[in-house]
Image (spheres, rainbow, N blue to C red):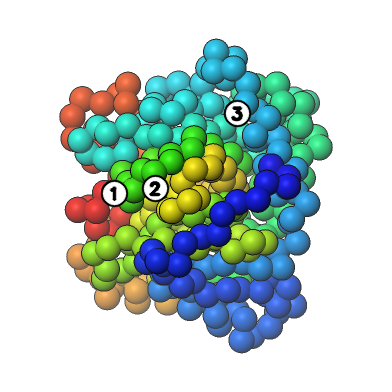
Amino acid sequence: MHGTTLPPFPTDVPTHPLLIIDFELIKAGDYVESERLWEAATTLGFWYLKNHGADKEVEAMFDVGAETLALPLEEKMKFEQGDEGQSCGYKKSGANAVDASGQLDAVEFINISKDDALAFPRVAHRTYPAPTTAAIPTAVAPFVRKGLDISYTVLRLFNERLGFPEGTLDRLHDLEEYSGSEVRVIRAPPMPGKVTADRATLGAHTDFGSLSFLHNRLGGLQVLPPGHTEWSYVKPIPGHAVCNVGDALSLFSGGILRSNIHRVVPPPGAQGDHERFSLVFFTRPGNSKVLRALVEDSPIIAEAVKNQPEKDFETGSTAAEWFARRVKYQRINNRKGPETWAASRGTEHQPAAA
Ligand SMILES: O=C(O)CCC(=O)C(=O)O
Ligand SMILES: [Fe+2]
């Protein structure tokens, strides 16, 4: 991953600007910066994060992810996710649908559970292909710890803004409980000359959990901003993470925090000649936590829910059930028809786009 010169992101494709949030200022309690973060999280639900202090951990994790995904397919398949809704493990290219018609995805990824990373050498859920397992103490766990640190700082800010009693979001993401929190390294092969902005390599989705901390070097990530009918690219900025809110946090907050739909398409222009790696840390609630608007815990949320009578914030699902359902019904092996794709959906606001 080091020393490769990648072509610049083209200037002639539609991009959506995101607010750039300075994590150093957030940590220092800067009021203006916290206002800007709140603005980003409640409008699009996506922002850039600079000065996140995780560059070293990100680089190391990218390297291990690339080494893992470079193993022979046969070896990686020994650590497959399976069809029952387990996320951790390997997913080969073409194992998931990207839309209701059953079009196949074109990315492979490895997901490593934060529980396995933190429990190592004990196995919490499963084992992983060799370079990932070997790197749990040196690269995976340090990246997980940084990701958690950043997420809990942001969660505490949201806790206050949402009018929750102190510690509410911390308890919902209790580190003592197993959760779906995980690292993901994604690889898409070069797709030279494919002007296939309409061919998703990772289908349109909202993220399943609470917060995502994403790193990518090449374009391809697109968002469908509220009120828009056309997808826009999120331009990668070196050293800046892309962060976003997922379904769980959106549900807990009665929709005040936005879980926005996004997808991945082949990198635009000359970037399409290159292999695309991306890296995410997903922070998700404890497995037993029920996904619903916490109206009893905050008058702000009670009011928000009252003002959206058309929306149902009572999912009746635990975080574990929500997560497993979404993973399971994307799997092409489970597909019966368009209803299987529908069964994989989350809080996406625009079903037509999915
Ligand atoms: O690869 C990317 O840029 C985004 C990946 C993503 O949205 C996801 O894995 O949930
Ligand atoms: Fe995502």
Residue 337 visible, this angle: yes
| Badge 3 density bin: few <14, some 14–19, many ≥20, Cα 10 Å | many
* Residue 290 location (% of width, % of height): 43, 48
- The three-letter amino acid code for the residue at tag 1 is Asp
Of 122 and 184, the residue lying toward us: 184
Mark 2 beta carbon near ligand 1 (under 8 Å): no
Q: Which residue is mark 3?
A: 69
Residue 87 visible, this angle: no
Tell me if residue 149 comes above or below residue 344 in the rendering.
below
Q: Which residue is mark 2?
A: 265
Q: CA distance from mark 2 to mark 1?
A: 7 Å
Which of marks 1 and 2 precedes in the sequence? 1
- The three-letter amino acid code for the residue at tag 3 is Leu
Of 168 and 34, the residue lying toward us: 34
What's the mark number on residue 111?
Answer: none
Q: CA distance from mark 3 to mark 2?
A: 20 Å
Looking at the rendering, which quadrant does residue 65 occupy? top right
Tell me if residue 313 comes above or below residue 1 in the rendering.
below
The N terminus appears in which quarter of the rendering?
top right
Q: Which residue is mark 1?
A: 198
- Helix, strand or loop under label 1: loop
Which of marks 1 and 3 precedes in the sequence? 3
Looking at the rendering, which quadrant does residue 318 occupy? top left
* Residue 84 location (% of width, % of height): 41, 24
Q: Are marks 3 and 2 in contact (CB under 8 Å)?
A: no
Tell me if residue 73 comes above or below residue 159 in the rendering.
above
| Badge 1 density bin: few <14, some 14–19, many ≥20, Cα 10 Å | few
